[in-house]
Structures are given as C-alpha cells and as structure tokens.
Amino acid sequence: MPQGLHLFQLQKLLPDLGEGLVLRERCGSTNDEAKDWLRAKERLPALILTNHQEAGRGRRGHQWLSDPELSLTMSLVEKNEWKSSWLAIAAGYAVMKVMHTYGVKAQVKWPNDVWVGSAKLAGVLVEDVNGASIIGIGLNLGKLPVNQPFEATSMEEHGARIDSREHLITDIYLEWKRVTSRAHPHQIVEDLWAHLLWADQEVLVTRDGDTRVEGFFKGLSAEGAAVVQTKTELVQVTDVSRMRLKS
C-alpha cells in the first residue's frame, strides 16, 4: 500500500481547489487546521489533509485513532445550505459510493459512519464555524491492530487494492461534490435508503440522558433525523443519539 501523500500529485488531480488544497505533514486534527484556515479568512472551498494526525476526534468528544500508515484523514471546508445533520449523512454516502467502486460492500450507518457488516470503516465529524461547514472524514485503509476500543475494519480487509491515496482522495472529494450539488438532500434518500444500515429493522436508540427508544427504523426526516416506529407512535430521533440493532 502506498504511504504518505504528495501535494504535487493532488494538485494535478484537483486543480480547481488551487490554494484551497492544503497538506500538513503533521497536525493535531484536520478539523482544527480547518478552523485556523477559516479564522485566517482563507479561500473556500478548501480540502485540508495530513500525513500524521495526532489528536483526531469523533462525535461527542470520542477519540479517532489514526495510524498514518493505515488510515486517511481529511477535512472539507465550504459554505453549504444543507443542515449539518445532512452533511454528515451525505459525507458517509459519498464515501460509501466510492467504496463500492473498490469492491467494498459498505453501508451508511446513521448518523455519521460507514460500516461493513458489524464493523466501522469510516467516521464523519461535522462542525459549523463562522457560517461555514467543516466536514472531517477518517477512513481505515489497512488492517488494524486487534486492540481497538470498538469493532473496526478497513478497505484492505475487504480486498480493496489502493494503488494511490491521492486518487482515492480525489474520488471521495468529487463524489462529495456530486452528492451535495443537488438542491435538496432528500434527492439522495431513495438510493441512500437501499444502503442504510438497519433500514426497516428493529433498533434501540439511546438519547442523551439515557432515554431509550425502541422500534423499527422507518426513514429520515426533512431535518436528517431518524424516524423510528415504536409500538405507539412515530418518533424523530436527533443526530446526538446512538443507534444499534436490537438483539
């Protein structure tokens, strides 16, 4: 598997980004680098990348473990009218579509992950800063150590051959632009639903404060919330919740 990113190759593949294409050899997290980019009022859109991310994080402060030889981390920075909940779903959807071209049978796990089977392949963290959106993506490329805090998987474990990290990043970025060029996120729902983990299955959702919702996962609302059919009513669950398959 190729190691390390090369800026000149990315510039050839994504010339329209110009100075908005940024590669840091080492950083805390690409989302934090993106915040600095916005504070400096640099150009948008931007794509922030690094070879070594030392303090990555996921939703609700969870740590995102990032091995420079085994993973890919990036942050997209742009102004977009879609709500952050939909941006997270759309990023997962774009990654999933690219994974299918590599032969990886990935699915989107609401609200912000990409899974293969019962294991996490990629995660998304969306943050809104100064009227712009930062969409952080972490993707597992190579086989991971066994001592992970959660069940995880990688492209390599599912037979994907990665000849060029630069081409993989380009594929994800261009698919993201195709997905979000639509006027409304509901235009992706039909195809998304066919690849959404646990669609129409019985799930258990834990909200903040440990409130539990049990029922069948029936759809997505206009706000990007999960719609769950309980025994008595339809409930919309926000993106701050955790969902799992009811055993």
Image (cartoon, rainbow, N blue to C red):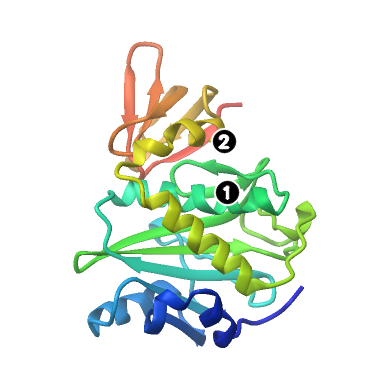
The location of residue 142, given as percent across then percent down, is 73, 65
- Regarding residue 53, the answer to whether it shows in the image is no
Asked whether the residues under the numbered discs 2 and 1 touch, taking CB atoms below 8 Å apart as contact, a structural biologist would say: yes
Rendered-image quadrant of the C terminus: top right
Report the residue at 53% width, 35% height from top: 196
| Badge 1 amino acid | Met
Q: Is residue 233 left or right of residue 149?
A: left
Per the rendering, the mark at residue 96 is 1
Q: Which residue is mark 2?
A: 195
Report the residue at 68% width, 43% height from top: 105
Rendered-image quadrant of the N terminus: bottom right
**Element type where label 1 sits in the image:** helix
Report the residue at 54% width, 43% height from top: 108
- Regarding residue 152, the answer to whether it shows in the image is yes
The location of residue 215, given as percent across then percent down, is 45, 21
The location of residue 116, given as percent across then percent down, is 66, 45
| Badge 2 amino acid | His
| Rendered position, 7 above or below 72 | below
